[in-house]
Amino acid sequence: PFSSVAHIHRDVQHGWLIRNLHANGASLFFICIYLHIGRGLYYGSYIFTETWNIGVVLLLLVMATAFMGYVLPWGQMSFWGATVITNLLSAIPYVGNTLVGWVWGGFAIDNATLTRFFTLHFLLPFIIMAVSMVHLLFLHETGSNNPTGLDSNSDKIPFHPYYSYKDALGALIMLLCLLYLALFSPNLLGDPENFSPANPLVTPPHIKPEWYFLFAYAILRSIPNKLGGVLALLFSILILFILPLTHTSKQRAMSFRPI
């Protein structure tokens, strides 16, 4: 697996470009997702419970896909990141160790683990596309939210050209940022340890995930108890599900009550 990535970079026509766009595209994708969630929180979009909850499911699916994709290059950080995260399952009482063995497909992280991670990394985007369609379906039922949190038909304007041009400009800017990253500093967001092939006998001094998982990893590391850390990590994301139940204000958006 490690040599196949080197082969893509060195021998395949424009393979380096495709790989750099793919690897850094994940980072840009998460920037967009986190901005989207932040906007939803600020404008009270979670009032549309179904749309919001499907969005949280999408976040979990994207996180799973990104994690599995990070394991595939089979560098040091890929291997040890997979070891740390899959071992979290062993914190589950009674069934933990069985579950870890089942995920690994053996007694350790090996080719069987890599094969199933590759399969899931390929299949999950199709599930993400399907769930995105359901997300949009529910959004079209209720209509999109806005900074005022008010729904007024008299204030509505056509989607085209006002929003289509705005979206096209946003997409173009993001694409230029991705191209700049892929062409001029492709390894800026990566870990130098991942340039070394996976070695189960050598543990890197600092095992850490990609930047977009750092918040969850910091929560995990901050609690000494293993099960407590795993639960805190889970709830740091799953807490988004209970947000609609916590809204008590008469005003939907925070625009009129800024922080």
Image (cartoon, rainbow, N blue to C red):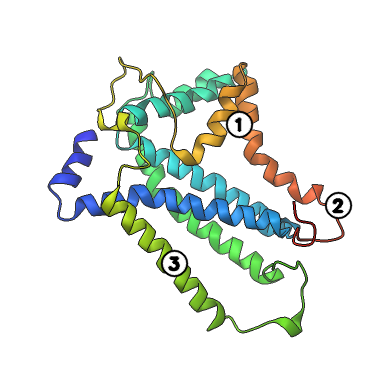
Q: Position of residue 130 (x, y in %)?
A: 51, 59
In the picture, the disc for residue 3 is none
Mark closest to the chain's N terminus, 1 or 3: 3
User: Is 136 or 36 nearer to us in this picture?
Assistant: 36
Pointer 2: what residue?
248
Q: Position of residue 217 (x, y in %)?
A: 53, 30
State which quadrant residue 105 falls in.
top left
- Horizontal side of 11 relative to 109 (left or right) equals left
Mark closest to the chain's N terminus, 1 or 2: 1
Distance from disc 1 to disc 2, alpha carbons, whole Å, reads 26 Å
Name the kind of residue labelled 2 in the image: Thr
Q: Residue at x 30, y 47 (%)?
A: 186
Pointer 3: what residue?
171
Image position of 45 with respect to 111: above or below? below
Pointer 1: what residue?
233
Distance from disc 1 to disc 3, alpha carbons, whole Å, reads 32 Å
State which quadrant residue 219 falls in.
top right
- Horizontal side of 106 relative to 39 (left or right) equals left
Q: Residue at x 61, y 84 (%)?
A: 158
Distance from disc 3 to disc 2, alpha carbons, whole Å, reads 35 Å
Image position of 251 with respect to 77: above or below? below
- Badge 1 crowding class, 10 Å Cα cut-off, few under 14, some 14 to 19, many 20 or more, is some
Q: Position of residue 50 (x, y in %)?
A: 70, 57
The secondary element bearing badge 3 is classed as helix
- Horizontal side of 20 relative to 57 (left or right) equals left
Name the kind of residue labelled 1 in the image: Leu
